[in-house]
Amino acid sequence: MFKILKLSYFLRLAVFLLFPFFSFSQEKEEKEKPKLELGGAVRFNYINSSWKEEQKKKGGEFGYDMIALKPKASYKGVFLNAEYRFYSEAFGGGFLKQGWVGYKFNEKNQIHAGLVYVPFGIQQYNSNNWFFNITYYVGLEDDHDMGFKYIHEDENFEYAFAFFKNAEELNFIGGQENNSSRYAYDVVGRNKETNQVNGNFVWKFGGHVNHRMGFSAQYGQLYNLDTKENGDHYAFALHYEVYYHDWNFKISLNHVAHNPENGEDSSNDILQMGAYGTPYEIAADFDIYTLSASRKFDINWGPFEKIEAYNDFGWMRKKKDEFDSSLMNVTGFKITASNLLTFVDYAAGYNHSWLGGNFVDDFSTGTPGAKWEARFNINVGYYF
């Protein structure tokens, strides 16, 4: 009987001493329960374009932009981030904007795999407006490709390295051109992006004035369906941001070159890029210069919380002398009211495929002395 009581005493003592560890393990287990969130957006557009007579006569048009679904999940350091968008058939229909799984090694380091964000230029946007900057229209802003990316972030530095096997591949038959029904611009037509490496480095410094100075580089191959040979392409960028109170300034200098191995009947000075269901031409070699400024204002007008005014400018200077430059400038403001986000933009373009002109070759040969065209646009979106 004494031995039983003694054993019972030691068992109670052991449970008492180990209770904090059992409690910690239980709490840790509760913290690591699988999490799933479903977000999304519903957006509508009002449009009035200077080059469309019907819109001018009618005082503009108001219609559907897109619906997005954004699932996010995490469990034991592994997480999912995806976004699928539904546009009208005229703009490519439905397609995946991004979709990747990641693993968080610690607070500073993580890895992503899948359709991941390409680390190039100012992250995440080189612009403030709904149209983005001119860098978006040649695949250098908010781009996503199929591959792997390693990310490091600390108080003073951010850097990322990535390998992309290819852009969004919608079929695996081989010998077929890439479909232009995609969110971000990629090379399409008779060439395909493959085996691309990227690096992005940002140095953060300053006290009450925050500075972000960075350098980006990418290099990859271009596989040609006709010659069955690999050409190449590369890009470099210097970029700088400064935050001062509610002000933000961005500047970027970009150099881009494509060297496709086209057949004898095709020019190496022009290639095709595609998104939203429709391809167009771009010059193979060019420089892009961008400059943006914005200012935020806190307001208290019923549900309205904040207004951000901005101006984004971009200049695409093509290397071939016979090709005319493309320019873009967007002046506008963004209004935040709870989950409602509204962009009011006046977007002007010169030799810009989405802002008047001749859609097919504005970003390639262009038209010397072309007329500036403009689009007044209001995008209303509810994000959840």
Image (tube, grey):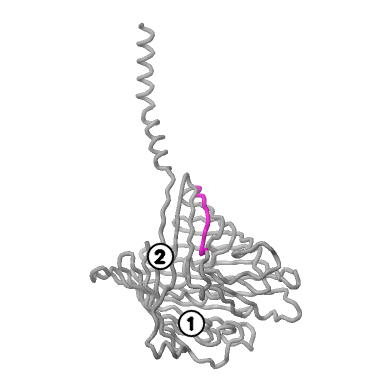
In the picture, the disc for residue 381 is none
Q: Horizontal and vertical percent for residue 153?
A: 48, 56
Q: Residues within 10 Å of mark 1 (few under 14, many from 20)?
A: many
Frontmost residue, 212 versus 98? 98
Quadrant location of residue 228?
Answer: bottom right
Q: Specify the quadrant that holds the C terminus.
A: bottom left
Q: State how far apart marks 1 and 2 are (Cα).
A: 27 Å
Q: Which residue is mark 1?
A: 328
As for residue 98 lying within the magenta part, the answer is yes
Please tell me whether residue 240 is drawn above or below residue 72 in the rendered image: below
Amino acid on which the number 2 mark rests in the picture:
Ala
Q: Horizontal and vertical percent for residue 289?
A: 52, 78
Q: Secondary structure at mark 1?
A: strand
Q: Horizontal and vertical percent for residue 79?
A: 48, 51
Please tell me whether residue 163 is drawn above or below residue 36 in the rendered image: below
What type of secondary structure mainly makes up the magenta span? strand
Residue pictured at 32% horizontal, 72% vertical:
307
Q: Secondary structure at mark 2?
A: strand
Q: Which residue is mark 2?
A: 41
Q: Is residue 231 left or right of residue 202?
A: right
Frontmost residue, 225 versus 350? 225
